[in-house]
Image (cartoon, grey):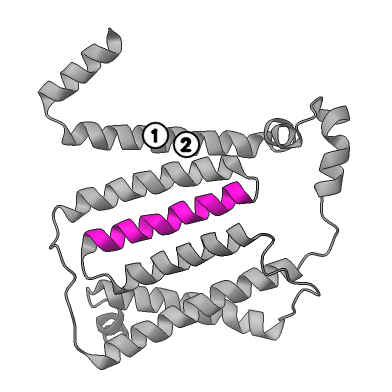
Amino acid sequence: MADRVTSGLQSGSLPVYLVVILSVAVVAPGVVMVRYWRTAPELVFAESPIQVVSAALVAAAAFGAVIARRRLGAVLLLGAVGYGVAVLFVIQGAPDLALTQLLVETLALALFVFVLSRLPTRFEVRRTRIRAVTRVGVSLGVAVMAMGLSLWAVSGRMAPSLAPEFLAQAEPEGGGRNVVNVILTDFRALDTLGEITVLAVAAMGAIALIRARLPDKAIRETTDEVES
C-alpha cells in the first residue's frame, strides 16, 4: 500500500502535487467550517465604488492569468493581481501594507521573469479532459474555501472593534494626533519593525537580482557613480 500511495502521490508532476496539497487544504478545514458555520448579521459588499472597480480589475487579471498561453503574460497578470491588492490596501488606509505588498510583489515578479528565461515561451497544452475537469474543480473548491473562510472570520468577532479605543488613546498615550502614525510607532511597533525588515530584505533581494544580471563592467560603473 505504501508503494502504491507513493507512486500515485509522488509522481514527479507539479500539477499532481498542487492538486493533492490544495485538496487537503480545502477538505480538512472545510469539514470544520461547515460544522460551525455562521454568518455575520451585517455584510457590507463595498464601501465605495473604487473598491468595486479595483476588485473587478484584480478578478479580471486573475482570470487572464489562468487563460494566458504565454508564461510571461501569465506572470505579468499575476503581478497585476498583487498590485491590485496593494491598491485595495491604499483605499482602506493601510499605506504600510501597500508598500510591503508592492515591494514583495516586485521581487516575486523579478524572480519569475529570471526563471522564465530558462523555460519555454508557451505553456504545454494538454488535451486530457479529466485533468482539466480536476483542475477546474480544485480551483473552484479553493475559491469557495477562501471566500467562506473570509466570511467566517468576519462573523467570528466576539468583542467590539478596537478602533474607538485607538482613537481615544492616540493622543494621551502615544502623544500624537495622527492616529495611523501612533498605531504604527506605538501600539504595534514590533509589527511595524517586522514590516520594515521585510521591505529591507525585499529591496536587497531586488538589487542583488539586478546586479546578478548586469555585466561586471556595468556594476563597476554604477558603483563608481554612486560613490562619486
Q: Residue furthest front?
A: 49
The span shown in magenta is 72-91
> Which residue is painted at 55% across and 72% down in the image?
146
The location of residue 6, given as percent across then percent down, is: 29, 80
> Which residue is painted at 28% across and 48% down in the image?
111
Task: Please tell me whether the stretch drawn in magenta is mainly helix, strand or loop.
Answer: helix
223 sits to left or right of 138: left
The residue singled out by tag 2 in the image is: 199
Circle 1 SS class: helix
Closest to the observer, 48 or 170: 48
Q: Residue furthest bottom?
A: 130
The residue singled out by tag 1 in the image is: 203
117 falls in the magenta region = no
Q: Report which quarter residue 13 is drawn in.
A: bottom left
Circle 2 SS class: helix
> Which residue is painted at 60% across and 84% down in the image?
31
Give the amino acid at mark 2: Leu
Closest to the observer, 80 or 203: 80
The location of residue 148, given as percent across then percent down, is: 61, 76
How many C-alpha atoms fall within 10 Å of the one at disc 1: few (<14), some, or many (≥20)?
Answer: some
Q: Are marks 1 and 2 in contact (CB under 8 Å)?
A: yes
Q: Is residue 220 above or below residue 199?
A: above
146 sits to left or right of 102: right
> Which residue is painted at 51% across and 55% down in the image?
85
Give the amino acid at mark 1: Ala
Q: Report which quarter residue 190 is drawn in.
A: top right
The location of residue 165, given as percent across then percent down, is: 86, 44
76 falls in the magenta region = yes
